Image (tube, rainbow, N blue to C red):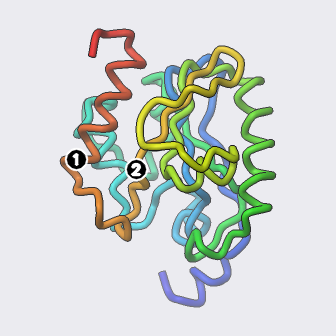
Amino acid sequence: MTPAELEAARDRLVPDVVADGLRVLFCGINPGLMSAATGHHFARPGNRFWPVLHASGFTPRRLAPAEQEELTSYGLGITNVVARATARADELTDEEFREGGRLLVAKVERLRPAWLAIAGVTAYRTAFGDRRAQIGPQDRTIGGTRIWALPNPSGLNAHWTLPKMAEEFARLRVAAAGEPA
């Protein structure tokens, strides 16, 4: 993609990959420009979402972003806290996060996933007004839906290596399967 093609994707929406009653609804911060340009979540080559999803045991093989619709066959889906595409998450305002949190609650109430997994603890903190939230399961629920804050899989999140991130995603997978930890 050329820089002009990516810039033309700014503010575009990327459709959710959802179904009723999912095991886990993964929630990104917001779509990046590559995702908006392609229509596929976590599409930037440096993003570790797809490799981590496989390494953690959620999928039997590494899916490509263009195969995102296969997720529902595994009881998984994808949405975002904020729908509009930007080059970087720091382009979003706190008000956008709070409004995104309100819309996300309504979506979760409608879809009723077992778990909502927000990939970005800072996004979770801002969207839900929980400044002390840490990575892992949260006390808050949305109806019967439990919430798990995951590390942001962006390649810019250097604090989390792919193996450490896969361990955290695997903890969620075990919890979502109802297996003992």
Residue 139, horizontal then vertical, whole percent: 56, 26
Q: Nearer the viewer, residue 54 or 119?
A: 119
Residue 48, horizontal then vertical, whole percent: 33, 56
Q: Under tag 2, what secondary structure? A: loop
131 sits left or right of 171 in the view = right
Q: Under tag 1, what secondary structure? A: helix
Q: Distance between the residues labelled 2 and 1?
A: 10 Å
53 sits left or right of 43 in the view = left
Per the rendering, the mark at residue 151 is 2
Amino acid type at circle 1 is Lys
Per the rendering, the mark at residue 142 is none
Residue neighbourhood size for the residue with mark 1, other residues' Cα within 10 Å, grouped as few (<14), some (14–19), many (≥20): some
Residue 174, horizontal then vertical, whole percent: 32, 20
Q: Nearer the viewer, residue 36 or 94?
A: 94
What's the residue at 59%, 47% (across, down)?
A: 124
> In the rendered image, which residue does mark 1 sit on?
164
Badge 2 vs badge 1, beta-carbon distance below 8 Å: yes
Residue 141, horizontal then vertical, whole percent: 64, 24
What's the residue at 73%, 71% (across, down)?
A: 11
The C terminus lies in quadrant: top left
Amino acid type at circle 2 is Pro
Q: Is residue 159 above or below residue 120?
A: below
172 sits left or right of 15 in the view = left
Residue neighbourhood size for the residue with mark 2, other residues' Cα within 10 Å, grouped as few (<14), some (14–19), many (≥20): many
